Amino acid sequence: MTVDHNLEKVADTISRSSVQMSEQLRRSRGRWLSLSPTTWLTADRITLSVLWLIVFSIVAPILGPHAYGLFSIVMVFVAMSEWILIEGVVEALVTVDELDHLHMSTANVVAAGASATLSFLTSVLAPAIAILFGDTEIKYLLWTLAPLPVLSALSATPMAILRRSLNYKQLAVRNIAGLMIGGIFGIALAIAGAGVWALALQALAQRLAEFTIVWMSVPVRLKFGWSKAHFREIGPVAMDVLTGRIMGIVGGQLPRLLLGYVLGPTEVGLFALANRVLDLIIHTAVQPRTGVGRIELRDSKPGSAEFVGTFSKMTQYASILAFPLFCGATVLSPALFQIWLSDRWMPAVVPTQYILLSGLPLVVYYCIDSALLAAKQSSVFKWIATLQALTTMATVLCVAPFGLDLICLSLALRAWLLLPLFLLWFHRACHVSVYVALRPALCSLVGAVIMATVLSLPFLRPQWLSMRYDLILLFITGTGFYVIYLRLFARKQLTDFLCEILARRA
């Protein structure tokens, strides 16, 4: 009787604490969230992109592509430990129907143990990695950046709480403040002549600031505990997402190792810049809507009219902004790079154009991933990520000896060729027709392609006009043409998009 009574008391305590936490989150949302979650997340991504561009524009001419290539090689090993853990834990906690303190404390134990183990292994292997790439500085960089996975993994719980409550304002504060603090460190050290260490210490300062701010933003504190039952609840989803993220990291980061081994750090730096331009558009135009859509889709049954409608809107809002950015940036990147960076970075122009073309199918990929996770189809998400990684690695292995331009072109073709297969998997898993998945994006794609064709016309580049003013003129012309196209052929999509961005939450 005493044991049963104690168990009842424990259960009641957990229940009451969960209710209190939910009430605190709702009050916090009421105070801080007035704009829609999509607006906050979009503002977050745009601000981060602008800040990164400012920092990069100052630091890149000082350090050059070799330092960035060296740092990119090191971050391959750190990121493999860092991002797979944080995304796996966050997604597992978001998927749980009723989140309580034992879920969070158990997740903290798993995240801390796994990240510490991976950091230790990376440190042990650092000398061998340095020998492999023929640069002893890599060893010391790996040792210095070893704490990053632990800091990131322990930030997963408060990030999951904020995402569940759609409190993207606090996430924006965390991201922007962290990048500003790290950027100040990086700029100061680069000017002082620290070389690649300016990038390493910038990353450390940024992660430490993000860790501190995100824990100050939630009504819970960092605690550790263990519950076998709660681990069983979050474990399967976490493992599927972890596997998917591992494959994503493998497909995204290991090609840099191959390029570094075959072509050298300078080519890695050029390849990293091309991918960074792609990431800027993905982070600002695609991930804000797919991130919010992933939460919204949780409330509807896969295959239902509500699920299909929410997915259709998510695809529509993501494509209406991302497609013209990808197409326009492809046309304008030669002039942009010539104005923005030094001559040492000009060989990155053609690879960047090819990589940007691979971003068009990526928009659909991100929408599919969000729908699969919302529908609790994490196993399908895992297999899609695995195929992505394997085909990316195979492509780079086959084409690496022929140079960076051909590698990037092959990667763009790979993304388009895999799209039909992924749409078929999505249809079978979520019972959404391929036509419904593609219809919202087709109109935006046609307008973006026509806009890019117009921007390519020679008479829009008069010889007597300064390149800076010509770039501004092309940007205004492209934007105006695309808006006119939408008003003529997709007015409802344009209106719905503006309402989504400008809507205020009750």
Image (cartoon, rainbow, N blue to C red):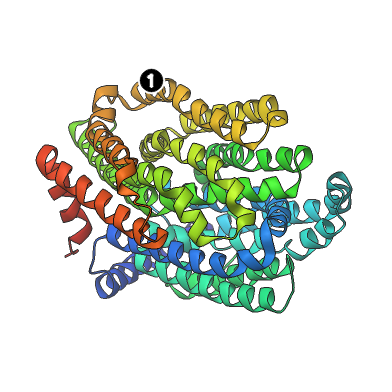
- Is there any visible trace of residue 9 in the rendered image? no
Q: Is residue 208 above or below residue 381?
A: below
Label 1: few (<14), some or many (≥20) within 10 Å? Answer: some
Between 393 and 266, the one lying in front of the other is 266
- Is there any visible trace of residue 229 in the rendered image? yes
Q: Quadrant of residue 250?
A: top right
Q: Is residue 225 above or below residue 238?
A: below
* Residue at 67% from the left image edge and 60% from the top image edge: 64
SS class, disc 1: helix
Label 1 is placed on what type of residue? Answer: Leu
Quadrant assignment for the C terminus: bottom left
Q: On the picture, is 481 further left or further right than 169? A: left
Q: Quadrant of residue 217?
A: bottom left
- Pointer 1 residue: 424
Residue 486 x, y percent position in the rendering: 16, 43
Between 166 and 364, the one lying in front of the other is 364
